[in-house]
Structure formats: C-alpha cells, structure tokens
Image: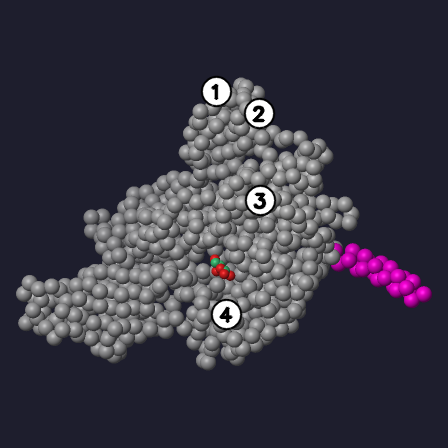
Amino acid sequence: MGLSVAMCCNAFLLVLLVVFSSWISCGEGSVSYDSKSISINGRRKILISGSIHYPRSTPEMWPDLIQKAKEGGVDVIQTYVFWNGHEPEPGKYYFEGRYDLVKFIKLVQEAGLYVHLRIGPYACAEWNFGGFPVWLKYVPGISFRTDNGPFKAAMQKFTTKIVNMMKSEKLYETQGGPIILSQIENEYGPMEYELGEPGRAYTEWAAKMAVDLGTGVPWVMCKQDDAPDPIINTCNGFYCDYFSPNKAYKPKMWTEAWTGWFTEFGGPVPYRPVEDLAFSVAKFIQKGGSYINYYMYHGGTNFGRTAGGPFIATSYDYDAPLDEYGLLRQPKWGHLKDLHRAIKLCEPALVSADPTVTSLGNNQEAHVFKSKSGACAAFLANYDQHSFAKVSFGNMHYNLPPWSISILPDCKNTVYNTARIGAQSAQMKMTPVSKGFSWESYNEETASHDDNSFTMVGLVEQINTTRDNTDYLWYTTDVKIDPSEGFMRGGKWPVLTVLSAGHALHVFINGQLSGTAYGSLEDPRLTFSEGVNLKAGVNQIALLSIAVGLPNVGPHFETWKAGVLGPVSLSGLNEGKRDLTWQKWSYKVGLRGESLSLHSLSGSSSVEWVEGTYVSERQPLTWYKTTFNAPEGDEPLALDMNSMSKGQVWINGQSIGRYWNQYKASGDCVPCNYAGWFNEKKCLGNCGEASQRWYHVPRSWLYPTGNLLVVFEEWGGNPYEISLVKREVASVCADIFEWQPTLVNWQMLASGEVNKPLRPKAHLSCASGQKISSIKFASFGTPEGVCGDFRQGSCHAFHSYDVFERYCVGQQSCTVPVTPEIFGGDPCPNIMKKLFVEAVCS
Ligand code: GAL
C-alpha cells in the first residue's frame, strides 16, 4: 500500500516536473549540477568553454572572436571581470569601450553561447595588480584577500554591483540570459594554506557572500579544495585528470586548461603542442570530466598599462587557438575543433554512465562509458611517451601513437586520435604596408620640475608616490665633487651603486644617459653599479625609475615595493665611499611629455617638435610623432618595433602598450616533442630575439587618414625603421598518412558503415578574401620536414603537384582525396606513405 502511494506520488511529481521543465525551457532556464555534470534545463551537458578576456581585444573584434570560438566547438565563453578597469576611482564606474561587459555578454548570447563569469574580483591573469584597483591599497586598515573588514567590504560592494548589473540586464540563465556559472575569488586554496585561520574564515565568508547574492546559477572556486557547499571546487593546470571535486555530488570541472603560457619581457615565447593539449583534454573527459575551459582561447593584448607581472609582455597571445590578432592558429584551432566534435558524439554515453577502466597493456587503458539506453563510447589511451601500441579492444585491433588517446563514440570506430592531426596547419606572415614614416621629435627633459615635484631627505617608495598613474618616477640629487679628487687626474671614475626594488632604471649624469639596469619577472630587484663621469663642482644625478606592471600574484602582493629604496652610494672618492641615501632628493612623478599629454592630438600640438635632419635618433628620452593613413583591407595590423629599445606607443591617443624590444629572450629553445609531460618551460621560441617584436594595432582605432602615431623612447632607437605590417596567412599545409588509422570520418560513422579502413582527404583553405595562388610543395610518398620546410623523401609520386594545381590553384579552399590513383599510381608499394602539401595563399 505504502509503496503504491509512493509510486503514485512519484508519478505525480514526474508529471509536475515535465510540466515545470517545459515551462522553464521556453525563455528562463535552470542550472544545476550533480556528480556527472552541469545541467541546463534539466539536461546534463559536456561543456567546452574558452577564455576570452573582453578588455584584451576591442568591441569591434568581439563578434568575430565569439563566432570563431563557436565554430571551433566552444559552448561557453569564460571571462574574468576586471575591477580596476571598471572602478578606476572609488565609486566612479566605467563600463564603456573595451570595458563594456554587458555588451560583451550580450554578444555571446546572440551567438547562442553561454557565459562563465569569473567575478573574482581578484583575477590574477597577468593583469596589473591582479585586477585590483591601486586605490584599494590605500583604503585605511586594508589587507587584501584575507579576513579583513575593509577588504571584505570593498569586495562585497564590487561583487554585488556586478551581480546586480547582470540581474538588471537579465543576463543569468535563470532569467533567460547566457550566464550559467560564476566564480568567486581565484585560486585561493594555496593562499589560504599560507594564511591559516584568517584564510579559512575568509573562504567561508566569500562563499557565503557570493551564494547570498542569489544569482540562481552555481558558483565555482578554482584551486580551492575546501570550497564550501554548494560551491563547486575546480581544477586549473596543464593536466587535470587526477582531480576530484571535494564532494561526490559535484561535477569534475577544469576551469583553466592552459593552452600555452604567457610571455614576459626577457623571456622566450612559450608554446604548447596541440597534440599534448588534446591528449590532456581527452584524458580529463575519459576520467569523467564534464567541463573544460581553455585558458586562453583568445589571449589578446595587454593594451595600455594593463600588463601585470611585473615584466609581462604586451602580447598575451598565450599560443591560444585564436592568435593575439584573432586569426585561427592552425592546426591548433582545427585539431581542437575535431576533438570537440568527437567528444560531443560521445556525450549521450558520457553524461549517463561512469567509465569502466580496463588495462590494454603495460601503459595502455580503455575507458568505456555504457549507458542503460545502449549508448557506448570508448577512449583508448596509450600513455607510453616513446612507442606506438597495438591494442585489442572488442574484437578489433587499434594502433595507438605514443602519448595519445583515440576516441570511439560508438565503441568501434576511431573518429579521432589526439596525436593524429587532420586539420591543416598555417604559416603566418607580417607584411610591411607602410614604412619610412616622416618623424618629428621632442626631447623629454631629465628631471624637470613642476606641480608633481617635491623634495625631501631620503628615498621614497615608487608606487606609494605615483599611485601607479605613470610608470615613471624621477629621483634626482646633487653631488659635489672637489677638484682635488684623485680620479680627476687620470684615475678610475667613481662607481655609483644604486639598489632598487624594481623594475628598471636609467641613470643620467648631468643630463647624459650613463647606464641602465633592470630586473626580471623572477626577481624584479636590480642593482646598478657602474663608473660614472663626474666633473668638478656640482653634478646632477637623475635616476629614472620605471615600473613595468604591478605584481598580480603572490602572498600580499599589494605590499611589494618598487623604486629606488637604496642604499645609493658613490665609491672611489678620496674619502672612500659616500652614502647618498640620506641626502636631499628631488622627485618628479611622471614625464613632462605625459603631463603635456603628448600622446594625444591636442597635447601633441601644444609643443614645438623638430623635423627633418633635427630629429633625434638613437637618443634617450625622446618623443616621436608622425601621421599615416589606414592601409586598405581588413587584415589585422601591427607595428614592427624592432629598431627601438624600450618605451610606449600610442595611436590616436590610445595606448597600444609598452614595448621593450631591447630585452632579448634568454632561454633554451631546443626542439620540443609533443609526447611527455608538458610544462611552461618545455617548448619555447624566440630565444636570442626580442621577446616581443610586433605590437597589435586594432583596426578600429584607425581613421581612414591622418592617424597620429606617437612613440616615447626611453633608451634610444631608430624610428625610421618602424613599420606598420599586416598579418595574414602565408601558406597552408596538410600533412596526412595514406591510411589514417585514426581519421575523423564523420559521414561514415553517421551512415553506420563500420570497420573499413578510411581513406583521408586533404583539406586546404586560405583566409577569407585570399586564394591559393600556387603549390609550394606537394609529395605523396615519404616526404619529410615541417610546414614551411617540407622536403621530398626517397619515394615520391610524380603527379603530386599536378593534382593540387588542378584542384586548388585559384580557389579559396579545396579538398583532395589521398589515394595512390589520384597521384598517378603507387610510387612505392608496401610502404606506408604520407602526403605533404603546402599551398601559398595570397
Ligand atoms: C592561473 C591564474 C590565471 C593566470 C594563469 C597563468 O594560476 O588563475 O589567472 O594567471 O595562472 O596564466
């Protein structure tokens, strides 16, 4: 009896639930979770997400970036909210331009994607001060990211402001909007561990504060093992398959799958092979993961002074699937797109069953998901870093490349292998479109005096003094040299020693640049210690101390100091060493050119510039300006700054960021194999070159004619070699095995045709607006090399070129089946052949 009542109630509940869910599915939705996944409107989902930070591109770029993410198989766009961009002064908010958060979210919604909003408000993100406004540091009694009243009040105020804004714009999924998830704090676990009890109290408070805001969608805390219920703790890293959430009823989520790594000035440019990235994602999914976010999907640019660190480069390219300029990075984008398709084919099985794991060999495993309704998906993994593995699975044999996972959405057919790239690769080029600008110059004064100047005994801390309104702080003092000094009669110059907490320093003696010193991301401190040319009488020592972005990570990074804290001394005098630390110093915040706003149209016309032969070249502290017309076309643009040393650039008054071409990338750029554990030091480029040569100039910042380009050079460079370049696809390549055992063949799978060896097809496609103009290389046989540098091997089908010339030249894209017949017959029977082709785009 009792049982039937329960059954009847259950049935009634079920009806109610159906009615209710059909009601909520039209418009407002619901977001919930269980051990398997996030559910939207009651449906469990495997979600692919990608980070795009809105201020790291322009509103004009957003629709295209979002569209390309969607085409790449992304369901969710994840972004931090950048507090310092939104509240530049206490209580004064800014949500325009690149900071138009609502517009960004609505564009994501229009594209039919979801949003994961990481409100933080601490971001980290290699962003200046980790996203905190600098004024926050000066709130009386404040201590960041701990159980501290003033901090919690400020954090709550800003978080509430953002949540209310989202609510009033109806942007939460429960209101019919795209936001399905939020994040409070960021990687607080390690910090909490260091702080102990106040850290734990702060975590509890932050979690409750967030949940009480009633967004209707789940919150996550990343890298926070003790995230209080109902908050989901999530994983960040290069691999996250080992991770389990802190409760059995929470889904396994990966909020930051690092697609590459950031570049620092002075460091090489890191990259991550897509085979390893795809392997790590497949490994996460096969272990029951259901949400993965690529950090970054589009990294973009640290415009202005938004880069953190210190020493973070202006480019935040991150080796992401969309490059800094918003172009497809191939084969990364395409190989991940294929991966996402393969995962989605497995979705019915993935969301309804737990995997059964069986061993297929010493270093090989099968993860099989079988649902009650008959869906079956299998992941066959070979963890061996060096060898292929032949494995048997369900009466069939599979050949697995080293360090790879094959995906079988029907438990029979391999549609994807993480180490077998079907997508085309592309070579990019930077083509000069304007150079030989006619420059005018203006000399910045060494340590001028104005309203921002003051004098005092001793040395000051830089950030407390500038409040980070500028990178620059002048420290100036006088040194009297007696004519009787020994060094004046042919001895060695006295040595000036300056200890600075960072980040860079130019030393001027009597107005002349005497030397430079700088730190690095690892250790921002520096010591200048060089002989200086002093004359008898009064000498001016002017130290230009430069901050290169504020720290964004580390325990109480808000307390880290910058600038010349001393001691400062002069040695090699008759008296021995003279301590200058405690004498009278004059200070000037910022440059004269900054207070005159020389970067802007109005400011730049307020002073006399010199032209023609009078233009200073290779002179420190020089402002340059010129005008130029926007090049035709819509390819992304950049400035090639390789002839310059260090400074900042503006276009039409907007800062494109700091440049530092003089800081060469030191590191070991040895060839890197995708197989084996990856870390950010494994695969590096640019060693010995500038860490960053090109600086993105957003198209939308340009007028058709008369664009004002202003450069401030601190150190000395040749502006006549600066050029504006466009970025475009130079060529595209395919690199395919004749029998791709692991080929993506969706049609065949759909038609139920199974177990047949699959013949691959070569797909080549230039960017829109381009055509394939010639075939640079084609060989069906045993070719060698990498895209851009292919070579014929001992076996080569003589008609290799003909076919591509016929099918592809003159087309924007083409598809050629890889069969011996099409290339005029088999050039070397019984040998496994490959096709390599490179097509030039123009
Ligand atoms: C993570 C952090 C991100 C970013 C990343 C490195 O630990 O959460 O904000 O800083 O490291 O790019």
550 to 637, vertically: above or below: below
Residue under label 1, please give it.
798
- Magenta stretch: residue 299 in it? no
Residue at numbered disc 4? 191
Tell me the CA gap for discs 1 and 2. 14 Å
- Secondary structure at badge 3 equals strand
Query: Which disc is residue 778 wearing?
Result: none
Q: Quadrant of residue 784?
A: top left
Q: Residues within 10 Å of mark 1 (few under 14, many from 20)?
A: some
Q: Is residue 5 magenta?
A: yes
Q: Earlier in the sequence, mark 4 or mark 2?
A: 4
Q: Earlier in the sequence, mark 1 or mark 2?
A: 1
Q: Amino acid at mark 1?
A: Phe
Which of pointers 3 and 1 lies earlier in the amino acid sequence? 3
Res 819 label: 2
Percent coordinates x, y for residue 837 in the rendering: 48, 30
- Residue 382 is tagged as 3
